[in-house]
Image (cartoon, grey):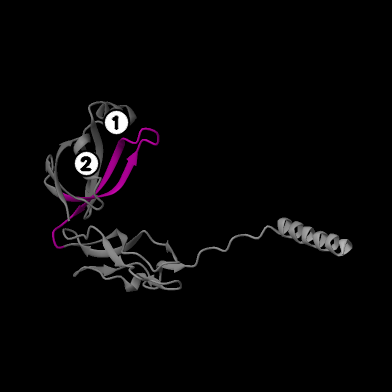
């Protein structure tokens, strides 16, 4: 998995005004918590945080005001412009087990005539904090209509265990929906056919 180094500054001013001032400097307010420690308020460089968070479950090595490993557990973004307003970071230790959401990616093509319906985009797993899988691939090559794959069918990396219900449906292959019948058009076509038959009988 990815590990990214980010410089951290101690944050001593709080409130909306202080947060806006931090963001104007292209920085992000953050809070580091976990392991029964007091929450630590930090300021992080905005661009580096934005790049790091493009990777799911990225492991962040904080340096400077603190020297710790952390996982992003909550990210607040501006609803209109999308920039990061605040980050919650969970303190982790090497060798420690954590529970995270990991993306499930289908690989291959299903059999012709079916439609792939993926019910779960991610599954919850427990894994070592510094060896979080970047994703879980599931082979769907040749799957036919009616076939399905549950969470318990997924092949997980060594050292990773499933937290999601093993019977939860991840994906299945369905048949294409039948074309809806236009009853009015069908009735109209039948009436026209009857009228044509009657006209033909009269002309004989």
Q: How crowded is mark 2: few (under 14 residues within 10 Å), some or many (20 or more)?
A: few
Is 53 above or below relative to 105?
above
Which quadrant holds the N terminus?
Answer: bottom left
Residue 14: where, in percent of width, then height?
28, 32
Q: Name the residue under label 2.
A: 51
Residue 3: where, in percent of width, then height?
15, 50
Q: In this view, does 165 lie to the left or right of 89?
A: right
Task: Identify the residue at image location x=37%, y=67%.
Answer: 110
- Which numbered disc, 1 or 2, marks the residue that appears first in the sequence? 1
Q: Is residue 117 left or right of residue 161?
A: right
Q: Distance between the residues labelled 1 and 2?
A: 20 Å
Task: Identify the residue at image location x=74%, y=58%.
Answer: 189
Magenta-drawn segment: 69-95
Which quadrant holds the C terminus?
Answer: bottom right
Residue 75 lies in quadrant: top left
- Circle number at residue 126: none
- Of badges 1 and 2, the one in the foreground is 2
Residue 191 lies in quadrant: bottom right
Please identify the dominant SS of the magenta region: strand
Q: Mark 1 points at which residue?
A: 19
Residue 87 is a magenta residue: yes
């Amino acid at each position: 998995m990815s590990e990214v180094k980010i410089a951290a500054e101690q944050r001593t001013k709080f409130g909306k005004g202080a947060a806006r001032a931090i963001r104007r400097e292209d920085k992000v307010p953050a809070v580091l918590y976990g392991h029964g420690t007091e929450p630590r308020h930090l300021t992080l460089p905005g661009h580096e945080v934005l790049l790091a968070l493009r990777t799911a479950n990225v492991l962040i090595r904080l340096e400077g005001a603190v020297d710790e490993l952390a996982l992003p557990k909550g990210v607040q973004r501006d609803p209109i412009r999308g920039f990061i307003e605040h980050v919650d970071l969970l303190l982790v230790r090497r060798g420690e087990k954590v529970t995270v959401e990991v993306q499930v990616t289908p690989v291959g093509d299903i059999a012709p005539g079916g439609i792939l319906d993926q019910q779960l985009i991610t599954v919850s797993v427990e894994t070592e904090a510094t060896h979080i899988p970047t994703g879980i691939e599931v082979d769907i090559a040749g799957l036919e209509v009616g076939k399905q794959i549950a969470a318990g069918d997924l092949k997980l990396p060594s050292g990773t265990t499933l937290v999601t219900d093993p019977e939860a449906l991840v994906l299945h292959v369905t048949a294409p929906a039948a074309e809806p019948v236009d009853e009015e058009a069908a009735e109209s076509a039948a009436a026209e056919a009857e009228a044509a038959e009657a006209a033909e009988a009269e002309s004989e």
